[in-house]
């Protein structure tokens, strides 16, 4: 099957028919859950006419002649408080503030100076809701404030939609976390990462044992996972290598909707349907797997009503020219921070296999298909994976990631700051010229001729050198000076 554009792949995911299971949960534990069936009141609320005020229940007809000039004394009434039942013979409640009486709990008579209409200050039986009437329809996400109402209407448990996601790692080279890999071996970490990500959506997650590169075994694992879950994810085995059997195993059991997407990373991502359930094959490289999860799995779950962690997109200034292949959608991991009052973003090195890129990054940049580059200084959309407020407490560095840089990061973290790095494989002095970072980590003997004309500050950090602009005085730069001065 030919690769398809990212937008077409996304549409294929969006058009999948939801598949739900259902489970019963206590109403008290149901916040955030989605109802699988409508909920109906067990009884009427209130169950009988009750007073809406503290006062006196009366017959409205007895009050017709009352006026300021002609006060009227009543001897037939009930003293009531808010929520007390109003007996059938009475049809209105006069607020205690509008009545003259001797102040006792059970006065023999009261005096009023205005008539009252029937029904005033009386809540009818079932006024809130009548027995058997619908409280919430199926598909409603239960809010914390809904729970009090549900409990008040006699509903102690609800049937909610449930989705279970099965994760199958594949590959004969996989070993368990905690084992030291030999050459050619890989620690199976993707399923742990994926499970942690998915649990943020409120879905159930089942992690299966790794399956060797064997078409029959992979097919059997898919059959089992499809029978036990509503969504199945396969980690690795989605490329075109001689030991990549995911596509053929899915095709044996169902239909492949696409295999390969014009995107980077996560180009080998595939989507199939087996017994009406989606089966998504994800690349094995960690950052490619993360990209497939963010772009496709998240979209699938949110379309089905399961919301995940908040994502905020900010317009960020590119700290350098960010090039891309015009034939693909690229999702570039990057680091963003406020620099001199504006948000600046520095891309990470392109490598889907380097998990440290994901750790150093706090956002990704989407460069749409058809765009060859984003020039330095241009605004690009940066999708944050941290709260936006964190950008004002983030120090952005360029240059090498040395032990001295690590020491700076440790001091900063102890003081409540975060240090982020751009591409650590390249030293770009232009960052300082363009005011695109707070500082650059360089070799101690670095040649700074390129920055002639800019007043610089130099701080030794271990066997490296931190170089900063002297005229940058935002809060992050001042904090960085403090941390560097303590080196």
Image (cartoon, rainbow, N blue to C red):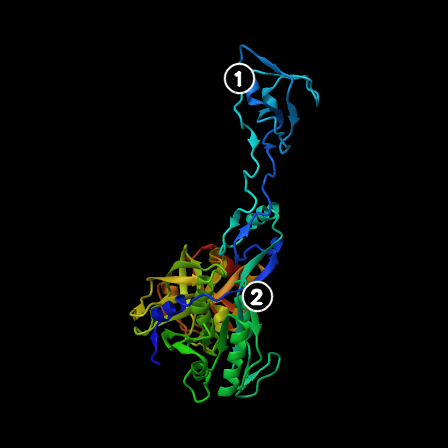
Expressed as whole percent of the image width and height from the top left, the position of residue 426 reads 41, 74
Residue located beneath label 1 in the image = 64
Q: Where, by quadrant of the figure, is residue 77 drawn?
A: top right
Residue located beneath label 2 in the image = 410
Expressed as whole percent of the image width and height from the top left, the position of residue 68 reads 54, 13
Which of labels 2 and 1 is toward the front? 1
Query: How many other residues sit within 10 Å of disc 2, few (<14), some (14-19) or many (≥20)?
Result: some
Q: Residue at x 53, y 10 (%)?
A: 69
Q: Which residue lies furthest to the front in this view?
A: 89
Q: In the rendered view, would you say 188 is above or below 382?
A: below
**Callout 2: SS:** helix
Q: In the rendered view, would you say 479 is above or below 333?
A: above
Give left or right: position of 361 versus 107. Answer: left
Q: Where, by quadrant of the figure, is residue 429 drawn?
A: bottom left
Q: Residue at x 43, y 71 (%)?
A: 348
**Callout 1: SS:** loop
Distance from label 2 to label 1 (Cα)?
Answer: 81 Å
Sequence order check, earlier mark of 2 and 1: 1
Q: In the rendered view, would you say 13 is above or below 176?
A: above
Q: Where, by quadrant of the figure, is residue 300 drawn?
A: bottom left
Residue 52 or residue 270, whichever sits in front: 52
Quarter of the rendering occupied by the C terminus: bottom right
């Amino acid at each position: 099957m030919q690769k398809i554009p990212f937008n077409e792949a996304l549409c294929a995911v969006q058009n999948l028919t939801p598949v739900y299971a259902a489970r019963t949960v206590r109403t008290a534990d149901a916040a955030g859950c989605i109802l699988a069936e409508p909920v109906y009141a067990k009884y009427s609320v209130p169950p009988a006419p009750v007073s809406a005020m503290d006062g006196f229940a009366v017959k409205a007809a007895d009050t017709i002649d009352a006026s300021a000039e002609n006060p009227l004394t009543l001897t037939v009434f009930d003293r009531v408080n808010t929520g007390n039942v109003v007996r059938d013979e009475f049809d209105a409640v006069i607020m205690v503030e509008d009545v003259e009486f001797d102040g006792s709990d059970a006065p023999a008579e009261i005096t009023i100076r205005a008539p009252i209409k029937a029904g005033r200050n009386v809540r009818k039986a079932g006024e809130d809701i009548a027995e058997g009437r619908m409280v919430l329809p199926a598909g409603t996400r239960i809010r914390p404030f809904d729970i009090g109402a549900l409990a008040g209407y006699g509903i102690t448990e609800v049937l909610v939609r449930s989705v279970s996601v099965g994760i199958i790692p594949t590959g004969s080279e996989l070993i368990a976390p905690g084992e030291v890999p030999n050459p050619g071996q890989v620690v199976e970490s993707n399923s742990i990462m994926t499970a942690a990500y998915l649990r943020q959506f409120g879905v159930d997650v089942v992690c299966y044992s790794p399956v060797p590169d064997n078409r029959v075994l992979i097919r059997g694992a898919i059959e089992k996972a499809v029978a036990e879950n509503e969504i199945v994810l396969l980690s690795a085995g989605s490329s075109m290598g001689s030991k990549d059997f995911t596509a053929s195993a899915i095709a044996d059991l169902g239909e492949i909707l696409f295999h390969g997407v014009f995107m980077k990373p996560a180009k080998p991502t595939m989507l199939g349907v087996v017994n009406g359930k989606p089966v998504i094959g994800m690349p094995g490289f960690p950052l490619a797997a993360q990209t497939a999860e963010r772009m496709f799995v998240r979209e699938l779950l949110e379309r089905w009503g399961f919301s995940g962690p908040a994502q905020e997109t900010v317009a960020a200034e590119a700290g350098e020219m960010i090039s891309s292949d015009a034939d693909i959608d690229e999702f570039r991991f990057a680091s963003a921070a406020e620099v001199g009052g504006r948000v600046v973003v520095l891309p990470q090195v392109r490598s889907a296999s380097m998990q440290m890129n994901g750790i150093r990054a706090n956002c990704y940049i989407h460069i749409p298909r058809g765009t060859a580059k984003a020039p330095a200084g241009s605004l690009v959309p940066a999708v944050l994976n941290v709260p936006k407020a964190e950008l004002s407490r983030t120090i952005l560095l360029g240059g090498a990631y040395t032990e001295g840089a690590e020491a700076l990061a440790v001091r900063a973290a102890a003081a409540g700051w975060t240090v982020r790095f751009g591409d650590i494989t390249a030293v770009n002095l232009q960052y300082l010229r363009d005011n695109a970072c707070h500082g650059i980590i360089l070799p101690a003997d670095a040649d700074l001729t390129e920055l002639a004309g800019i007043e610089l500050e130099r701080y030794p950090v271990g066997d490296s050198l931190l170089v900063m602009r002297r005229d940058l005085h935002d809060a992050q730069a001042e904090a960085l000076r403090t941390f560097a001065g303590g080196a």
